[in-house]
Amino acid sequence: MSGEMALQERRKGAMRVLAHVPSAEIGARIAEVAVPSHRELRAAESGLVMVRGRIGGDGAPFNLGEATVSRAAVRLDSGQVGFGYVLGRDSDKARLIALCDALLQSPEHAGAIETKVVAPLRAQMQAAQEQGAAEAAATRVDFYTMVRGEG
Amino acid sequence: MYVAVMGGERAIENAHRLLAHERRGDRSVPELSLSQISEQLGLAVDRVMSEGALYDRELAALAIKQARGDLIEAIFLVRAFRATLPRFGATEPVDTGAMRVQRRISSTFKDIPGGQVLGPTFDYTHRLLDPGLAEGGNPAAPALAATSDVPMPRVTDILRQDGLIEPSPVAEEDAPVGDLTRDPLSFPAGRDLRLQNLARGDEGFLLALGYSTQRGYGRNHPFAGEIRFGEVEVEFFAEEIGFAVPLGSIELTECQMVNQFKGSATEPPCFTRGYGLAFGQSERKTMSMALVDRALRARELGEDVVAPAQDEEFVMSHSDNVQATGFVEHLKLPHYVDFQSELGLLRKLRREFADANAAPEMKEAAE
């Protein structure tokens, strides 16, 4: 995998985690990292995306309905531009995700963001998802056949 | 004809003030919070998101609170709100096959890879009112069991492997996707537009239509091939970033109906299908949607169009409860001038009727 692709996968991976976590928790984690000077490249705003499904689950796309989305862009003084897109109307969260995305592209800060912000929140997200999966698994039906009478 | 009538401002203002008072109810009772609605009336929130065609739990909860629990009014509020926001674009199509499943059942196969997962369901409850719930209290924590990595393919994918079911229709990569929030409806409508219409359609209307197909008005012999509910990841391709950005996940319910076969001289017979997909846990809605989706394919599958559920213009023109309630409820608005003209006409007709009936008598009297 080229360096650029690897970086893209890391950015996507971080976005996937951060989108699932409340903004207060992202903020609390970022507070533990030395954040360099930066500014908002684009004021955070809320809008809509049209969510698409597929006919039959695997066929041609169709428009299911919209969802609220917030987005922001942040630029570090060192030049890296980060983007935040997230479901909901929490523009602080979009801004925090954009900041993390910018820092992940900075060789100087990427390590700290990965270990102090993304990794612990990923563990938290996975734990929540595993809890949900375990609750669902307990409702899985174990069929057994009743044998009538005696052989 | 509508004519502005002045003089009602104070009455309207006071009526809204009274509405706010009634909405609050007895002030010695604690006020509902949005998180209480979202957490404890979750299925109402799901319905408002689904038919409001806007996924945002908090907004749907606010709409339910503001509408005093009138869900169609809440759906109306959500639709009006969405019109105030810009649209950034459309997401990548969601992959329901990769859903983090909380519930997944099939009524066609007992043993399916991944198994039958009941999840949180009203099925198998006795529908007896629970006095314990009236008193409140914390229920037991959910049971846990070991999870497995066995994938959960869609039941239709399994049938598809053996060619026993028709494939889903495919489209060119960049083919336009119909959007009835942008373009007015015209007929015949493609299946993409029909599904969008049904997805935001009134659950009660679709339930009745789906039921009508089962009772013989456009029968299509359905089996619930699979119903699944859970979370799917949503991604959005943002130009400025250059890759599909993960936005987070949403809860969806999907229903795959497996229906009577079709076949021809050149193609072997296979099952046909109807599809339902909706925001949140909306099982009745997606089942009804799938029945109606299949019924609306009558023309495509060479079936006679004889029943209301098969008539796309009838179904699509009447499924939207915001449009429907707008037209029905507009009858409440002042129609004074309209009515005056009707009244004038009626009086004239009655005069003519009276004259016509009085005439012979007068003639008789004259003789």
Image: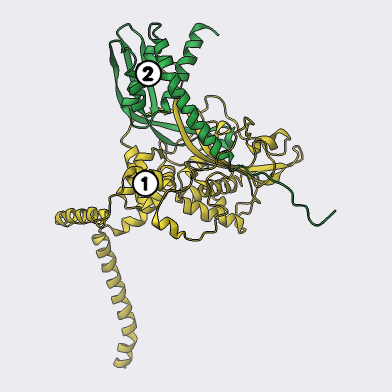
Chain colours: A green, B yellow
Residue at image point 40% right, 28% down? A21
Q: Secondary structure at mark 1?
A: helix
- Tell me if B303 is positioned left or right of B38 in this view: right
Is any atom of residue B48 visible in this view? Answer: no
Mark 1 against mark 2, which lies toward the viewer? 1
Q: Nearer the viewer, residue A124 or B228?
A: A124
Is any atom of residue A88 visible in this view? Answer: yes
> Pointer 2: what residue?
A83
Residue B20: give x, y in percent of width and height: 23, 52
Amino acid at circle 1: Ile
Q: In the rendered structure, the residue with mark 1 lies on which chain?
A: B
Query: Quadrant location of the N terminus of chain B?
Result: bottom left
Q: Quadrant of residue A117?
A: top left
- Tell me if B297 is positioned left or right of B279 in this view: right
Residue A103: give x, y in percent of width and height: 37, 12
Q: Is residue B244 above or below residue B318?
A: above
Q: Is residue B169 above or below residue B18?
A: above
State if disc 2 and disc 1 touch (CB < 8 Å). no
Residue A74: give x, y in percent of width and height: 32, 16
Q: CA distance from mark 1 to mark 2?
A: 33 Å
- Tell me if B205 is positioned left or right of B265 in this view: left
Q: Nearer the viewer, residue B226 or B242?
A: B226
Q: In the rendered structure, the residue with mark 2 lies on which chain?
A: A
Amino acid at circle 2: Phe
How packed mark 2 is, by other alpha carbons closer than 10 Å (few <14, some 14-19, many 20 or more), is many
Residue B277: give x, y in percent of width and height: 52, 41
> Pointer 1: what residue?
B37
Q: Is residue A147 above or below residue A101?
A: below
Q: How many marks?
A: 2
